Amino acid sequence: MSVECRKNFVSNNKLCINCLRLHYGACMSKYKCTVSGCKGLHNSLLHDSAELCSAVKNQTVGERGIETVSNTTRFEGQPEVAVLTYGNKCVLLNTFMIFVKSADGYRIKLRGLLDNASTICVMREDIARKLGFKFKSANQSITGINGITQSSKYSANIEVSNRDYTFASNVQFSLLPKIIDAIPVSKLNISDLNIPASIELADYNFHMPGQIDILIGSELFFEILNPEQYYLQEGNVILQNTKFGYLVTGTLPQSQQQANCCLISEPSLDITVKKFFELESLPDDSKEITKSEEEIYCEEHFVSTYKRDKTGRFIVRLPIKENAETLLGYSKENAIKRLNGIWEKLNKNNTMGTLYKEFMNEYELLGHMEEIKNETLDKINYYIPHHSVYKPEKTSTPLRVVFDASAKKQQVVFL
């Protein structure tokens, strides 16, 4: 099988281009392409010589040894990720353990991420549902890095607190199916990181890959910070004290094959309203509007057949296609069958029968229908069956009559 066929197979089956398995999120495999000079994030079976040339062209080395290699191959179902290695250093993100009060009053521990670049707080929607929070309709537009926008349909007011309950706050969270991939991407080596035993960390598993359940933005970011700091490994690692314990931040001398950025914000109301009116606005008069044949026919039919009655209401004839008689078929038999069924119900319920007759009489008096004494079989005829919806508990309209122009019969075309 050629390389192109292998790529098509992977793409069609939505497999990971690295481990060739079906999964969601970042690939946890440590293997790279073993073809000499490549080391790209794809399986060796999918390597193409053209990719090697492209990768070499995109590789640059800066003054501080910063290497950037972009994997230009992208398959359907696989996220587009630029592989960034900053001098073999891994940046630690601010993960911590936080407690939230469920709808039943229990305190549940979740893994969170502090992000002062976010103007909102976010929680995973599946977590919020399990904890029984009351959802509010939000329809909120959230913008991230590079202007990528997604919408949050719901929000919820949730109380968050630290372990000993010395800090608590009620915050409105936007709910999303997913916040970010596992952080960190792979297990970090912290054997040389001598953290003092007296230090209580906000997340003792900061070096282990784990899901993020909640994101705290700038609304609470600086409120939960404390002034104490400790420096490790010549200042490369900082222990920042917070009301949740010490955060481990800074850089470690090891590489990570993925870059994460959690900048999210709410677009201004002016921009949202502007986009709405751009979508709803009609084309300029200078632009030619292309109409289909049916649209042109409907407009001409309206102009030639419409009229207004004494009350000012518009009246227009139904547009009938040329082959309507063949498509509609014989509908009288079906309408009579439905009518006989109605008579059986009305005979069993006198109140329902009285209301049904009163409606039909009123419908005729208002001019919405009239009796046809001499049926002309040479013209197109269509009989609309009708039935009643009877709800005696309703005092205003206990009975409604429904005219079923979509009644099923042998033909697949209805009126």
Image (cartoon, helix red, strand yellow):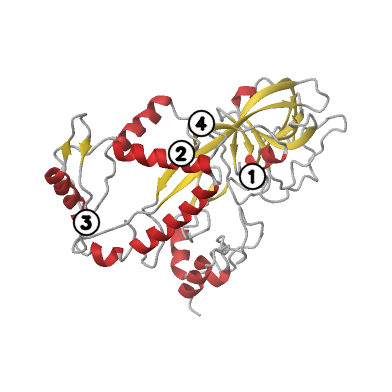
Residue 83: where, in percent of width, then height?
55, 52
The residue carrying mark 1 is: 89
Q: Are marks 2 and 1 in contact (CB under 8 Å)?
A: no
The residue carrying mark 4 is: 265
Lower position in the chain sequence, tag 1 or tag 3: 1
* Cα distance between the residues tagged 2 and 4: 58 Å
Res 149 seen here:
no
Of residues 224 and 36, the one drawn nearer to the viewer in this rendering: 224
The residue carrying mark 3 is: 374
Given this view, does label 1 or label 4 mark the residue nearer the observer?
4
Res 270 seen here:
yes
Give the number of the disc on residue 355: 2
Picture quadrant of residue 175: top right
Give the number of the disc on residue 213: none
Given this view, does label 2 or label 4 mark the residue nearer the observer?
2
Label 1 element class: loop
Residue 33: where, in percent of width, then height?
58, 65
Left or right: residue 329 compared with residue 84: left
